[in-house]
Image (cartoon, rainbow, N blue to C red):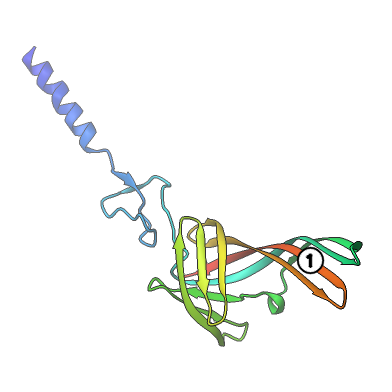
Amino acid sequence: MKKYLYLILAVSVIFTSCKKEEGCIDELATNYNIDAEKDDGSCIFSVAGGTWTTQSVVSTGNMTVSMAGLTVLDSAINYTETNPDSLEPYMLIINENGTYMEHDQANVMIEQGTWSSSGNQLTINSPDTTYILTVNSVSKNNLSMSITFNESETEMGMTMSFNLTQTINATREW
């Protein structure tokens, strides 16, 4: 009887010691687990690192124009821009040290500044403007972030107002 008990104990120890530790095994992830041997799909990635190249900018919103309190134009805005010459930012390098650089299609740096993040909010401080974006999703190679503009301007008795949300979809090159 003791032999059977030892045999069962030995077999159970062998099977439990063969189980691989699960976790994030991608070294680029913020939650990389050096001890993990099996990827459990839990990897989390930051916006920092690599070069983000914009693939599309989706713009949605509305614009109204009024004169003397009467609406003369009320128009919906809904378009997607994919032409590389019209995409801005075209290339964005977000460094882990809190700095960023923006490059144009010819890979010429056109702007640089600082950035910070809190939760899903990304704040970009350019030399003359602060942009607050919402990070919709970020993975190892894809980023979707949005920014909303609300503007109103009156000139020569005509008031133009627009509400616009732009969603920037980018891919990352490491």
The number of callouts visible is 1
Q: Kindly state the secondary structure of the residue where label 1 is placed.
A: strand
- Which residue is at 33% across, 44% downward? 22
- Whole-percent x, y for residue 71 in the image: 90, 61
Position in image of residue 174 (x %, y %): 46, 70
Name the residue at the left extreme. 2
Q: Residue at x 81, y 73 (%)?
A: 154
* Quarter the N terminus occupies: top left
| Mark 1, residue position | 161
Q: Which quadrant of the structure image shows residue 20?
A: top left
Left or right of 12? Residue 150 is right
Vertical placement of residue 36 versus 27, above or below: above
- Residue 69 quadrant: bottom right
Q: Position of residue 133 (x, y in %)?
A: 57, 63
The one nearer the camera, 87 or 171, is 87
For the residue carrying disc 1, how many other residues have a C-alpha within 10 Å: few (<14), some (14-19), or many (20+)?
some
Classify residue 32 as left or right of residue 52: left
* 4 relative to 89 in the view: left or right: left
Q: Amino acid at mark 1?
A: Ser
Task: Give x and y (percent) for residue 113.
Answer: 48, 79
Q: Is residue 59 above or below residue 93?
A: above
For image coordinates 6% across by 15% down, the residue present is 2
Report the residue at 63% width, 82% height from top: 105
In-front residue for pair 62/42: 62
Task: Name the side, left or right, on which 103 lies relative to 65.
Answer: left
